[in-house]
Amino acid sequence: MASALLSPTQRYAAGTLFGLAIHEAQIHQSRPLCVGSSHQNHIEDDDDQRISTGSSTTSSADSVSEDPHLWVHPDSALLRPILQFLEIDSGAWSGIEETAGASHSSHHVGAYLRLLSEESEESSSEIKDQELALAKGVDCMKASMEASSDFENKRDKQREYAQDRREKCSVPEVPETPSTTDEIEVIQSIQERTIATVPEQLPTQGSEYKFKEEPAEEERILGYERKITVLYQLLSASLATMSENSKNSKQRKGYDARHRVALRLLATWLDVKWAKVEAMETMIACSVMALVKEEELKRGENGSEKSTWAKWKRGGIIGAAAVTGGALLAITGGLAAPAIAAGFSALAPTLGTIIPLFSLYHMLHAEIYAAAGAGLSGTKMARRIGDIDEFEFKAVGENHGQGRLAVGILVSGFVFDEEDFIMPWEGLTNNLERYVLVWESKHLIAVSTAIQDWLTSSIALGLMKQGAMLTVLSTLLTALAWPATLLALTDFIDSKWTIAVDRSDKAGKLLAEVLLKGLQGNRPVTLVGYSLGARVIFRCLQHLSKTEHQANLVERVVLLGAPIPIKDENWEAVRKVVAGRFINVYSQNDWMLGVAFRASLLSKGLAGIQAVDIPGIENVDATDTIEGHSSYLWATQEILDQLELDTYFPVFRSSATKN
Amino acid sequence: MGSSSNNSGSSNYDLSFKVLLIGDSGVGKSSLLVSFISNSTHDQSPTIGVDFKIKTLTVGGKKLKLTIWDTAGQERFRTLTSSYYRGAQGIILVYDVTRRETFTNLSDVWAKEVELYSTNQDCVKMLVGNKVDKDSERAVTREEGIALAQQLGSLFLECSAKTRENVEQCFEELALKIMEVPSLLEEGSNVGKRNVLKQKQDQRASPPGGGCCA
């Protein structure tokens, strides 16, 4: 059975820890993690760990049962299915929920880790062997996943591209590498100016994020095998979450982004590397795949698929398969790892995207294969919305058909040719199954070219030489009156810009619909976009926030140089549909954005050049890396690396943190 | 679910207190709680981990909401209890009058735990001897109970979850005593105020900032 590896007490502890992680993750949505206490003047001992759920009509109640907005509330259907899968006595459920949602929930983590570490009286050597086998299997899988990708080659290609774009886009007056003392002086003056002229920039909003949560102290008393087993069980439970009580309308299918975020936090508490959890994901995916295939062969074509699946579900076959997979890997040991990995990947393509198997609970058969087969890469203008001419996903990276349980959708927004939709994302090395969104290339190229032409026009260069426009804010704040000749030139940009902005809003809606349909295989999605691509993502999230969906679809979001006003947009609501990290990367030197957005910049602010002061949004100042809007083409990769997206907590490791 | 009792007007209360039930396994903590919440007197299976119940009642003209945490007495869950003392305004220490060791364990083990883990200096303690309906099997006298209560500086009651004798008094007296302590009263009313005003977190008058989260 699924839970045989852990004693009832350990399962109870694991379930509660997962509940604690789910609740913490929800808190972190609206509460920054230790980025100073400038606007969140709360102290640890206050009894306010309860979440205010956004709308002013909601009172913060004293118990979880009174606040259905909480992720640990039964209505959210996040925790109970897990407890059920772990076969925890239903009498203990409400106690677990209340513990998870209680005022001082984080203090319980240590106690439950201790409970988890205790040896159960019936713990036999057989169980220990199985735990060991599982842990070895996971290590093995991780190793083979790492070995299978050719990072070096990709990096080289990426570097080449970056160099090429840098040359193409660089403004003559700004050399690639400052070498003469003159040039260094100019750069320094830019930096001084930035600091001097933008007084409203809070010191705490910079890139100096600190880790708040380190592995829990009690983590050390837990054996590595036990940790892996616990994570594995919880992961299986998350994937197998069943919708038996279909009366609940909020019930969703597939792998919930909030579960993945909670697992990430739990892995941090346990000090287990996230790559190990990703290895487990792939292991389970592949095991289930193999199992389904075998079952299909046995069964032939007749027989009701639905009832068979129901039978499997009851038998806890997901968990069983998972354990089998682990054991299988372990038995063959390290030597055979590549062969097994090859076997797994050989299996995968035959069924297309395998992941929808996890949503089989609803709908086995045709639809899935249809959906999976088509999937994201088949979404080539599935239907026209308004006047969108182009909207297509292209697979990038090496992780396709490899049993990856998380998807990345990457959206460019400042492009000069088709390649710019793909190349900025080619060098990514994470384990996401990655897709780029190619959209409205004609309009994007037009506006990008117009802007680039304007930037290199003599008048703009002249201004830049004088240093008048070195930071957008200072320019607009200090010199409101621009030379008329300069403004005249921008008319040309404005018309193109307006069209492109309009298209990005429409594309955002389309993207939301794709996600709502589950074309990503009902897997958690990470959205990354720069320039107008960031706007597409923002609009997509905005659209999602208007549906009944909570943060079940989108796991992480990174907006770079986003042309989105700060005021008059409901950032809070948008934040709420993202389960994990929400990052706004901005550059104070991005005056292309400033020019294009000058109408509302002063009154409404702009996410691409300023911090967004909303609790729970990580603001990253990339002014040092981004010297102009086109820099996102080649610097996005580097910034994403510095953000370490696989970390639960805000991270931005940059040269800027040195000072 | 278990947490629903008469919470029809759950946000309609003046004060809210957190109460913790501790004591050896089988002394009847859960029975006492169920008897108090739902007037029923079924036998309870051993508690797994920690259970949670809410009860609203009127004491001294105030509407109170008690959030009661019922801990497992079993040894294997002992490690959990320590983290639940935090923030409790009332702690009920329960023993079984027919089993002497549950009484001695209170002073030897549990009272020390309270001292060690309770974050609330003023928190009100109450010693409760359960199962007085089994008077013939009594192993701990009322006088011994009173003596220990004095030693611990706690309230004292004997009750029976089975016959419901003294069950309500037990919680009411505890609540009354909590309301007499100014610091606890303040803690309890903060929660209530938040609900009445339906304030968002930011707007609440928060205590002077203590810098970062730990």
Image (cartoon, coloured by chain):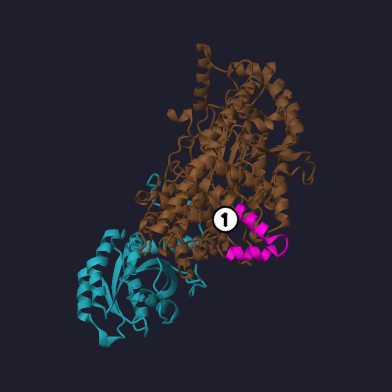
Residue A539, how many percent across, how many down?
Answer: 67, 44
Write the start and end of the magenta stretch as one range: A289-314
Of residues B147 and A140, the one drawn nearer to the viewer in this rendering: A140
Q: Is residue A274 visible?
A: no
Residue A377 is left or right of residue A433, and the answer is right
Left or right: A541 as drawn, with respect to B96: right
Residue in view at x 50 percent, y 12 percent: A181
**Residue hosting label 1:** A239
Query: Any magenta on residue A636?
Result: no
* Displayed quadrant of residue B93: bottom left
Looking at the image, is A23 positioned above or below residue A153? below
Q: Chain of mark 1?
A: A
Question: SS for tag 1?
Answer: helix
x and y, in percent, of residue B135 in the image: 27, 86
Amino acid type of disc 1?
A: Leu
Residue at 53% across / 56% down in the picture? A236
Give residue A267's position: percent from left, percent from top: 46, 48
Q: Nearer the viewer, residue A425 or A615?
A: A425
Q: Is residue A165 visible?
A: yes
- Where A644 sits versus A24, above or below? above
> What is the x, y in percent for residue A333?
48, 45
Instruction: Give chain A's shade.
Output: brown
Quadrant that contains the C terminus of chain A: top left
Where A340 sits versus A446, above or below? below
Question: Is A511 left or right of A81, judged from the image as shown?
Answer: right
